[in-house]
Image (spheres, rainbow, N blue to C red):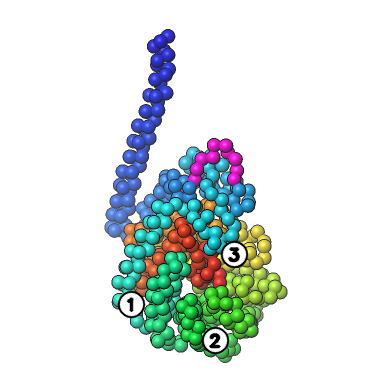
Amino acid sequence: MDFCHSLTCLLPCFLGVLWGFLFVCFWIFVLFFRVYLRCLTGCFSCLTGSNMFSVFWDRFSNNLHQWELYNLLHWRQNSTSKARTCGGEHESSSCFNRPMLQCMGVKPGSFTVSGKVPNDFSTARIPHFSRIVNARFSKRIQAKIKDLLQQMEEGLKTADPHDCSAYTGWTGIALLYLQLYRVTKNQSHLQRSLDYVKRILRNLNGRRVTFLCGDAGPLAVGAVVYHKLKNDSESKECVAKLLQLQRTVISTDSELPDELLYGRAGYLYALLYLNTEISPETVPQSIIKEVIDAIIESGKNFSKEERKTDRCPLLYQWHRKQYVGAAHGVAGIYYMLMQPIANVDQETLTELVKPSIDYVRHKKFRSGNYPSSLSNETDRLVHWCHGAPGVIHMLMQAYKTFKEDKYLKDAIDCSDVIWQRGLLRKGYGICHGTAGNGYSFLSLYNLTQDRKYLYRACKFAEWCLEYGAHGCRIPDRPYSLFEEPVTRNYRSKWDLRYGWSYSLPLRHFSTGDFPVSSV
């Protein structure tokens, strides 16, 4: 009896030690396997140029290391299995990345997120939100930003001195430092932005009129920087020069397109940007209305030419193609027309914009992705400029404007495409890179409060932090806002602010929307 009693007492201890030993062995095996697979990935990529192993590695990491999710988003076990509230809404297991948790053998509902997330993401409430992403992740991002800034400043010594655009030139750098100032409140960043603004304003060429690729961008950014420095005379001078471009924009004789990068929608963005950043009266509403009317009239005329008035009342082309994406296509134009600050009348939105969006929705591939143009049947590109990462912002804005669930459903389908296919060999850029794709998750998280999308955004950011480790292509202008690596600095700031202070690069209020989207 005594022997059996002793054995009974010792057995739990023995099993506990055995379980601990097996647990340690398992994680040692996992560690060595990860190192081996990483080395194999690098060797294979160098020899063949293929990213097959990289894709496998990323999917393997996402499935195997879900404990990072708990560490990253402060998951904790809820022993009482009581549901918590999330910003006033009932929080259920639908907030979790269900397939990922199930592959780890975790039952939905057995974990909850610590901390209550407010619906109002105003700057004053950001400190409460900082509990979602831990300090270690934030410190890693801060260190990477510092490193990338040093690389950027060194690389800019050989950059094109005449490229003043926000897309690939010096205005993008000024915009970066302006964003750094917003996040850190460090006056030296604002002064650095001013240095670039002065350089830019001396070299305007007058060839284009948009925010990203023309003179409107440098003038708008210059006006905002001078405004923040309390230099109202210089700020007003920049605004006046910007408004002088309007004649070209609204002229019916102009060859100007309507899209975002080179057309009227890009100029409209600059006007709305000023009214958001400085004051709602900076640009008179009458001027904004004239630009909007020109965009709408152009879309109606081209739709009539194509005999699609009933199906798509507003239709646009660029270089004789009816593009869909955010950069050159209808998604970017419709998005700008739906901006609340644009004050487009409800009748126009309902009778012209809404059916046009529905027409584009019906062009969706079975995968959930969208074509680059209406005539293209190839499901290939997953970029902001062409594909789901650009269209998703239009769909989310349509959901906010028209309050119909079909737009949110399509946006969620886009996000799944981006999660599956959004890590790109083209690089880390905003326009056609991984950083730009990651913004969709932040926008969707802001809209739905589903932490799955915040997790996905953080994982894309984590991938971007490993700059140079994926065998990605080197862009033509590597030190630019929309190509790289300024992109990663810019995007890292939203990750950083989810650690302690996040805001959209082109807005003064907190959001996860894409740069050059909401204003």
- The picture quadrant where one finds residue 340 is bottom right
Q: CA distance from mark 3 to mark 2?
A: 30 Å
Measured as percent of width and height from the top left, residue 208 is found at 47, 84
Measured as percent of width and height from the top left, residue 395 is found at 59, 64
Per the image, the residue denoted by label 3 is 395
Which span of residues is magenta-colored?
75-84
- The picture quadrant where one finds residue 7 is top left
Q: How many marks?
A: 3
Mark closest to the chain's N terminus, 1 or 3: 1
Which residue type does callout 1 highlight? Answer: Ala
Q: For the residues carrying marks 3 and 2, which lies nearer the camera in this image?
A: 2
Which residue type does callout 3 highlight? Answer: Leu
Q: Is residue 276 visible?
A: yes
Compared with 5, 423 (above or below) is below
Per the image, the residue denoted by label 2 is 243
| Rendered residue at 63%/81% (across/down) | 285
Mark closest to the chain's N terminus, 1 or 2: 1
